[in-house]
């Protein structure tokens, strides 16, 4: 491999740090009242988010200096560890249950979410497999089926928790990677039909998912039940208007919108900073994705291109789902907004993945 460039993509780095800084500030604003009530410390979530941010940025800077093809060497081991953690979290007494999902492993005073690790682990492995077996990908049986079988095995373990949002992001990321590696469009048409049927089956198999669909179509049919979160989110976004109510002046964060510092932080941001504030966030994400796509296109080898494409698509899909849910355009599913929402595993893993993307940018042939 050629020697690294002396500098990464500083626009990508600056955009990431800007989004992270806004996220830390908004986590405090959104969580202060809830933290004061629950922990008698309005800075409780802020202090933890700052800790995660410092750890994440430190890891991002370190990973940025690790040559991206290093992950190719350990791709199989990384995937095996991720599968092991997904199985471990399902063991009664080991996995922690929160919000009805057994999705966390306790590590001291903190907890980790194995499904977050699987998103990145699967991207690293698929980038290696697809770059080494590109000719097979045009074959349905020899190329597409083995990859999808692996992805769906991980998805099945995630759904046993259950965590539809994270599973959907992982599957979507893998599908994009397989597609850009050269898979035939006709295969995706049939897989799309099968995937839609499977998605309908997943929804029909759990009553609470059916309630989420019906509440998405008409949240006011059950305003105190399944439609509660969507209604409260819209009550936050609507009054924000063009300029917002002002930083710290949100009304919905006062126990109307459940845990607003996580999945619904964009609603609080829109309420306080208005339509303009929301557009600024979307603009920053647009820059981040543009620089990521640029690095993927200019990567010196197929592995780097596919890995960068996986990271970019993972961020893009997660942003679209989160903001779609918050704005009432999609059914409610628990998923964080990258770099902005409160959460240790999601924030740390997102910064690590961007660190890999930054290293790829150091080798890019601009």
Image: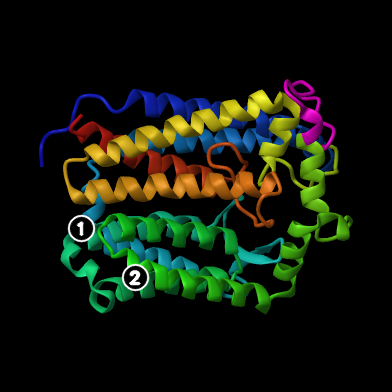
Residue 155, placed above or below residue 23: below
* Residue 87 visible in the displayed image: no
Query: Quadrant location of residue 97?
Result: bottom right
Q: Write down the residue under mark 1.
A: 131
Pinpoint residue 78: horizontal percent, then vertical percent: 33, 60
Task: Locate residue 130: give its quadrant.
Answer: bottom left
For label 2, the residue is 187
Q: Is residue 251 magenta?
A: yes
Nearest the eye: 164 or 352: 164
**Magenta-drawn segment:** 238-253
Residue pictured at 20% horizontal, 29% vertical? 366
Q: Nearer the viewer, residue 302 or 38?
A: 302
From the image, which quarter does the N terminus lie in? top left
Q: How is the image coloured?
A: rainbow
Q: Is 257 on the left-hand or right-hand side of 174?
A: right
Q: Residue at x 33, y 56 (%)?
A: 177
Local SS, label 1: helix
Q: Position of residue 346 (x, y in %)?
A: 53, 48
Snapshot quadrant of residue 121: bottom left
Q: Is residue 203 magenta?
A: no
* Left or right: 224 in relation to 146: right
Q: Residue visible at 47% across and 33% down?
A: 286
Q: What label does residue 324 carry, if any?
A: none
CA distance separating discs 2 and 1: 19 Å
Picture coordinates of residue 20 (x, y %)?
A: 53, 31
> In terms of depth relative to the viewer, which is nearer, 34 or 272?
272
Q: Would you say 158 lies left or right of 362 here?
A: right
Callout 2: few (<14), some (14-19), or many (20+) C-alpha neighbours within 10 Å?
A: some
Residue 54 versus residue 89 in the image, above or below: above
Could you tell me which residue is drawn at 82 percent across and 45 percent down?
A: 232
Q: How many marks?
A: 2
């Amino acid at each position: 491999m050629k020697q690294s460039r002396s500098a990464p993509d500083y626009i990508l780095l600056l955009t990431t740090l800007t989004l992270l800084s806004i996220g830390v500030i908004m986590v405090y604003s959104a969580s202060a009242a809830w933290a004061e009530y629950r922990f008698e410390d309005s800075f409780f979530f802020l202090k933890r988010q700052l800790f995660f941010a410092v750890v994440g940025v430190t890891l991002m800077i370190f990973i940025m200096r690790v040559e991206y093809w290093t992950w190719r060497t350990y791709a199989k081991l990384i995937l095996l560890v991720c599968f092991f953690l997904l199985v471990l979290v399902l063991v009664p007494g080991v996995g922690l249950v929160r919000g009805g999902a057994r999705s966390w492993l306790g590590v001291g005073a903190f907890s980790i979410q194995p499904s977050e690790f699987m998103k990145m682990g699967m991207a690293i492995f698929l980038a290696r497999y697809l770059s080494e077996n590109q000719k097979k990908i045009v074959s349905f049986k020899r190329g597409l089926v083995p990859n999808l079988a692996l992805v769906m095995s991980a998805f099945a373990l995630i759904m046993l928790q259950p965590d539809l949002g994270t599973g959907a992001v992982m599957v979507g990321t893998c599908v994009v990677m397989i597609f850009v590696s050269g898979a035939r469009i006709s295969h995706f048409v049939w897989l799309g039909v099968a995937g839609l049927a499977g998605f309908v089956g997943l929804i029909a198999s759990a009553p609470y998912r059916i309630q989420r669909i019906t509440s998405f179509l008409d949240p006011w049919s059950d305003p105190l039940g399944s439609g509660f979160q969507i209604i409260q989110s819209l009550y936050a976004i609507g009054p924000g208007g063009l300029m917002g109510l002002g930083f710290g002046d949100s009304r919905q964060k006062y126990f109307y919108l459940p845990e607003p510092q996580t999945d619904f932080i964009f609603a609080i941001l829109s309420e306080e900073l208005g339509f303009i504030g929301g557009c600024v966030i979307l603009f920053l994400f647009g820059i981040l994705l543009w620089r990521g796509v640029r690095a993927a296109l200019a990567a010196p080898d197929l592995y780097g291109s596919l890995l960068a494409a996986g990271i970019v698509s993972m961020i893009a899909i997660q942003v679209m789902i989160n903001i779609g849910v918050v704005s009432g355009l999609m059914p409610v599913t628990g998923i964080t907004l990258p770099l902005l929402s409160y959460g240790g595993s999601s924030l740390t893993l997102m910064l690590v993945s961007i660190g890999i993307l930054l290293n790829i940018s150091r080798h890019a042939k601009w």
